[in-house]
Each structure stands twice: as structure tokens, then as C-alpha cells.
Image (tube, rainbow, N blue to C red):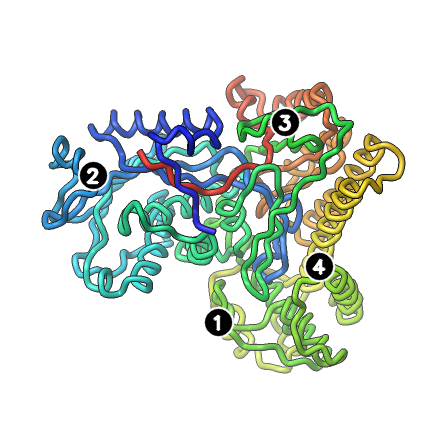
Amino acid sequence: MSVPVYHAQDSNELSSLSSKLIESCQKVVDKFTSIYGCKPDFIARSPGRVNLIGEHIDYVDFSVLPMAIDPSMLVAIKILKYDEDEDEDKENSKTNSNESLTSNPSILLTNDDHKFAQRKFDLPLDGSYITIDPSVSDWSNYFKCGFYVAHEYLKKKFPERFNNKPLYGLKVFCKSDVPSGSGLSSSAAFTCAVAMAIIRANTGKDYRISKHDLTEICVIAEHYVGVNNGGMDQAASIFGELDHALYVEFKPKLKATPIKFPTFKNSNATKDGSDTTEKKIGNELTFLIANSLVVSNKYETAPTNYNLRVVEVTIAASVLANFFQIRLPNKITDNGMDKGNLRDFMDAYYARYYNEHVPWNGDLKEGISRLTKMLELVEECFNTDEKRIGYTVNDISNALDCSREEFTRDFLMVFPIRFQLLKLYQRSKHVFSESLRVLKTLELMINTNNNLKNNQVKGNEEEEEEKFCQEFGELMNQSQASCDKLYECSSNELNDLCKIALANGSYGSRLTGAGWGGCTIHLLPNDTKKIEKVRKALIEEFYKVRYPQINEEELENATIVSRPARGSFLYEV
């Protein structure tokens, strides 16, 4: 399935987009024109996302359950072709020839947010890759990440055309309403939109890239600024569908399966089929997203937060494997670690002790059974108070039967980290229990949908809805507790938001995204008054208490009620 393309002059195509999305695109066209004096050729749009459940498990290849949201990044592009090339828009070439032809390819970046200064960089004339300095914290680096992976894709796909020739120069305008550092994947929305834009600009109107290919190249984009993420954010942004969560699998291959939220006939909600921000989601669920207003910069805090967790779970897999006398596969992974991960350990354990030499293929019941077993093995391996408190370098060297120098070389030199103790018990227990919660949530959604479809609901649907929300909410609450106590990626602010929401009617509340700041997500009753009750409680008990100088506009932007939104698309001007 390819990334959708909509044309501004085709009313039939635009009928499937909401008036709000069309208006947003037109505003970007107008702003681009006012800045550069010409219209853009097209807009690339990718949304943010929230993760419903499945935190910090994508980079060990376990499945997750996110959804795309309405806030998105829009990147408007004017292509500056070479002097010898014919401008793709002949009408534009007549009126704006100086704007569309160039002999010195460069990228000029303008951001709608004035705190991000305008940037310009030249493209190597020999077609070589641009350089990215991850030690410099600048917004243009994220553009370069998307540019870089798109360039790699173009060289691989069309070597004769792009190996020794620069890409086209561009004038670029970026506008986002995904709050940066909020845990809603503003960086993934940005890099996905940029990669899509670079490919479109250099291949023409008629080329179509598949969602799968776009996701695969974008998964590694942020690695070039030192963030060793998994692939959940990019998959959710690109594959998003209205009224659906996405069950994203990473093994045996990348796959995103839309899972529709159950529809309860007795719900009071209305559904209009648009993708604007609504108080209701489908006919059944409402998700409120609340921003802690604590910005979590993944790159700047990576040595003690995100990247440290990647290292800890990788070490945990090796310690478990050594304890149970299992050999893990050595492999080159997207995050730079060449050791097997916790998913590899699970597969290797079943190959040795159960003669199951085919890795787990995603079967729901089998996955629940295997993950339950993994939790038992974690308790068996880390079976003393000392092991459960944490490991020093000497402790792990002994556990792996290697020297300090070997351990340091194999695990601690891939990227910078800082620690006192490595908490292998807590991290591995979180990964396996969180992966199990994802499968139980998926099972709950599938079973509820099947019961409704086959008229097998016990009692009335209002009771079934209440039961579904309570069970879904409890899984979310368990996830938050695990993120807080075992993975230690929550914060006082995130915990307070969850506590207040639960006390005022939320079924389930948890952080969403990497944590250490950013946003929380709350499953609420399908009732506007109850939604407003939770919002008001968050405003009065959290925002006005922690941020007494906060103004009305900031309060309005601090919470979002979003239905599952559509994913990435191109808008041809």
C-alpha cells in the first residue's frame, strides 16, 4: 500500500479529508507564499502519535499498540531544479523561473515557530551524503536525518541517477502542532514528513513509495542524532487509520495491522467520519492526552535515560542467556548493539528447551504463553536481593564469564551512557510484562469486536462497554505502574496527572512516549460532561498549581482530545 496523494484541484479526492485538514494545508500554502514569494509544489504531512500500551519494548522487537493523532507536521516544498532540467510545473517555470531553476543546489529551511531560526545548507555537488553533527542540538539536524535516509533510499533505488549527482535544492517551510518534547513523536512526524518530501521532490509527481518502505527507512533516521529508538513512532505516523489502533509487529517482519475500536450501539457518541479533533472517538472511546509541560529532550538526556535503557535490556538478555546456557545470535541491529535482545532470548529458550526452532510468529495465544514463561525465568535468574537491586560492572562481568575489559568493549562503548548500577531485573521484568499487556489488550479488542459482531454480548451493550473500558483501563494502569517502578521512565508530573485523572473518572491513565516528561493518555467515559470534569480537575489541581503563571492559550493547548487519525500523505498544490 502506497502513501496516499491528494490533489488540491480534485474535489473528489479532497472529499475524504476533513475541512480542518484542507484548511491547514491551505494556510501552509499561504504562509509559504508570503515568505518565499511563490507557491510550494506540494506538502508532505505526517501526524504525531500516542502509544496506547507497549512502552520501551519496540527496540527489543516486541509488538506495540499505538494510534496516530490529529496534530501533525506539514512540510511545504518548492523544488529548485538544475539549469539543464525542465521544471516539472511548466506554468510555474514561466512565472517563477528564477525560483525553480538553480545551478548551486542548497536547502533553505524556515520554521513557523520563530524560536527555530532559519537555516541554509549546501548539497555536495558529487552526490555524496550531507553531514550531521549529533553533538549540536539544532532543529535542522532532524530535517537532515529525514533527508539522509531519503537520499540513501534514492541511491539504492536509482543508482545511475543519484550516485554521482546531487539532489535538488529546495525551499522548505515547516509547520507543526505536535508539541516538541511531549512524547507525541514530534521528531518522528518531522523526519517521516521530510523523508517523504525528499523522495517526492526528486522522483516526481507520479512516483509512489509504499508505506512499508517509507517506514523502514525512517525507523533509523533519528539514529543519526544519537537517539537509538525502535520503530513504533514511525510506523504509527505513516500507517495511521481513522478509528483504528495499530498493532505494530517488528518480527518476523515489519507489519502494521489496523485494529478497529469496538462500536457499542448504546453509546451516546456521534460519528461523522471526519478526522477533526472531536470529543468522541468512533462510537465508544474517548482518549484525553494531557501534556506535563516537562520537555524531554531524548538526545540530551540519552546517556542516563533512553540509551541507558537500551543498554540495560541488551545486557539483561545476555545475562539470562548465560544463566540458562543459551547462545544468543550476534547481529548488527538498527540501534548499534550487536548482541541478541530479549525477544531473541525468548526464541532461543524455546528452541533449546521446547524444540521450537521456528521463532514466535506473532500468534496471540502462543505469545501470551511464552511471555508468561519469560516472567517466571526472570524471577528464577535474578533470584537474590542483591541481583534485584542492581549490578556493577564487576557483577556483570562475573555473570557473563568475561573480563571487565571485554564487557566494557562489547556493551558500554556503543554510545555514551552514565550509571551507578545496571538494573537488569527491573528492566527485563518490565519488557516481558509490558509485552504481555499488549497482547492481552489486543485479545480484549478482538474478542469484544467478535462478540459484538456475532451478537454474543452477555447483557446489554452498555454493560459490555463498561466492562471493556474497565479491563482496558486496568491494563493501562498496570503499564503506568511498571513504567514508574520498574523502568523508571515516569516522573512526579506524569504520576500526578495520572492520579488526578483516575480520581475524576478516568478508566486508565499512563504516560505515553519515552517518558521522563511529555504526555499522559487517559481512557475516559463516553460522556462530554465527564470529559470536561477530568479536564477541569487537571487544570485546577495540576496546571494552575505547578504553573501558576500559565495563560488561557497554554491551558487550552495542554490537553488534546483526539480520535485515531489518518497517517502520512502528500498534498499536491
Q: Secondary structure at mark 4?
A: helix
Q: Nearer the viewer, mark 3 or mark 4?
A: 3
Residue 149, above or below 280: below
Q: Which residue is mark 4?
A: 426
Q: Which residue is mark 1?
A: 332
Q: Nearer the viewer, mark 3 or mark 1?
A: 3
Does label 3 or label 2 sit earlier along the sequence? Answer: 2
Q: Secondary structure at mark 2?
A: loop
Does label 3 or label 1 sit earlier along the sequence? Answer: 3
Residue in the foreground of this view, choosing between 250 and 553: 250
Q: Secondary structure at mark 1?
A: loop
Does label 1 or label 4 sit earlier along the sequence? Answer: 1
Q: Position of residue 81 (x, y in %)?
A: 17, 46
* Quarter of the image where one finds residue 492: top right
Q: Position of residue 140 (x, y in %)?
A: 33, 44
Label 2 to label 1, Cα distance in Å? 43 Å
Q: Which residue is mark 2?
A: 89
Q: Which residue is mark 3?
A: 271
Residue 197 vs residue 458: left or right?
left
Q: Are marks 2 and 4 in contact (CB under 8 Å)?
A: no
The three-letter amino acid code for the residue at tag 4 is Gln
| Residue ID at (47%, 38%) | 180
